[in-house]
Image (cartoon, rainbow, N blue to C red):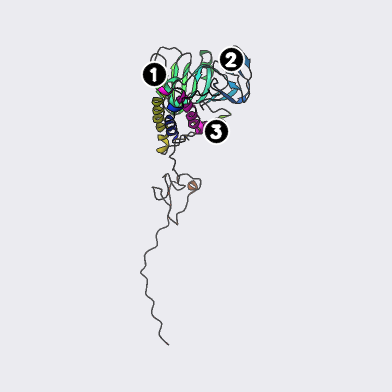
Amino acid sequence: MFRPGLAGIALTALALIAPCATADTAPADSAAFGTVDFVEGVVSVKTAGGVQSSPKSGDTIVPGSTLTTGPNGEIHVTTVDQGFVALRPNTVMRVDSYRAEGGDDDNMALSLVKGSFRAITGWIGQFNRESDKVVTPTATIGIRGTDHEPSYVAPEDAAALGEEAGTYDKVNDGGSFIDNGHGRTEVDPNQSGFASFKHTEAPRRLDHVPKFYHPSRNEQRIESRKQFVRQNMLARHTERQNVWARQHPERAQRLLEHNRQIEQQMRRPNQQGMTQQRSPYANRAPTPATTKRSPYGNATGYAGQGVRQPAPNAQRTPAAANHQAPATVRRSPAPAYTKPVPKKPKPQQ
């Protein structure tokens, strides 16, 4: 869950920019894309200079690198902007460009050559949305602060996967769009979009989730890392942003005001009581933060706020015992009213 008030801290720091325009040193990881924090199976990384290696946890991935996974391979990378990328098996992805210094020129461009990955966007996807994209052989996927799963099905793999060749994107949280030059289609949570390999028509939203989308063996780990990076994203972004603002005072005010508005939008779903942190494979709709299910019926809320309360002598059915809505609730009939008879006073001795 996002921490409130961090943009205000950055705005306060702006007041110190004029008197202390010192030369801040660049962060140690300013030239990095991210850090490997999980590897399974056969995985390789090849740099832009042609050096190939088998990565391990703790290794640094730099822009220009190509990541490749085998049939049982998977690699997870935490990006510098506190995002998260998890490559699925049989995937080839290249980091074309990347900058995460907290400024208005932060950007990320990934090329998905084949396969699929799941990405939880960091601060670039939140504050620099126009500069966060995934490119495939048939389309460009744009980001709007997203937990999504881009996929590219090559023509030679289409028959085995049982889906048409082309670019897919499944959105779990946030949103994305697919653009192929013939048109642009917005993709919302719990939807999938598609751009055909034939490249003769605009992208479209699908009426189903493609069969190849299914949880991996490490999906629970991805969920836990998602919560971790999101809890730390704004704090890390503020640190980088303040350094960048001191180096670029002429552009700082506009950037900080823009980011403050974005941060308010990011917190708005939580203020409406919606739970953002949920597994896309949980097969359930978002539930209000204050929801409490009654074992006696379908009503939700706390006692006194719309929950159907059982009578003291109500008999719970087996369905109610299993926390399901009972078909009927049987209540004993109320006893007939009888007027009390006054007692006769005892005679005095």
Q: Is residue 330 above or below residue 156?
A: below
Distance between the Cα atoms at labels 2 and 1?
33 Å
Percent across and percent down for residue 286 are 44, 36
Magenta stretch, main secondary structure class: helix
Q: Nearer the viewer, mark 1 or mark 3?
A: 3
The residue under the point 39% across, 16% down is 202
The residues colored magenta run: 222-250
Q: Which mark is residue 224?
A: 3
Please name the residue that numbered disc 1 is placed on.
184
Q: Residues within 10 Å of mark 3 (few under 14, many from 20)?
A: few
- The reply to whether the C-beta atoms of the residues labelled 2 and 3 are less than 8 Å apart is no
Q: Earlier in the sequence, mark 1 or mark 3?
A: 1
Question: Left of 216 or right of it: where is 331?
Answer: left
Percent across and percent down for residue 315 are 46, 53
Distance between the Cα atoms at labels 2 and 3?
29 Å
Q: Earlier in the sequence, mark 2 or mark 1?
A: 2
Q: Which mark is residue 278?
A: none
Q: Secondary structure at mark 2?
A: loop
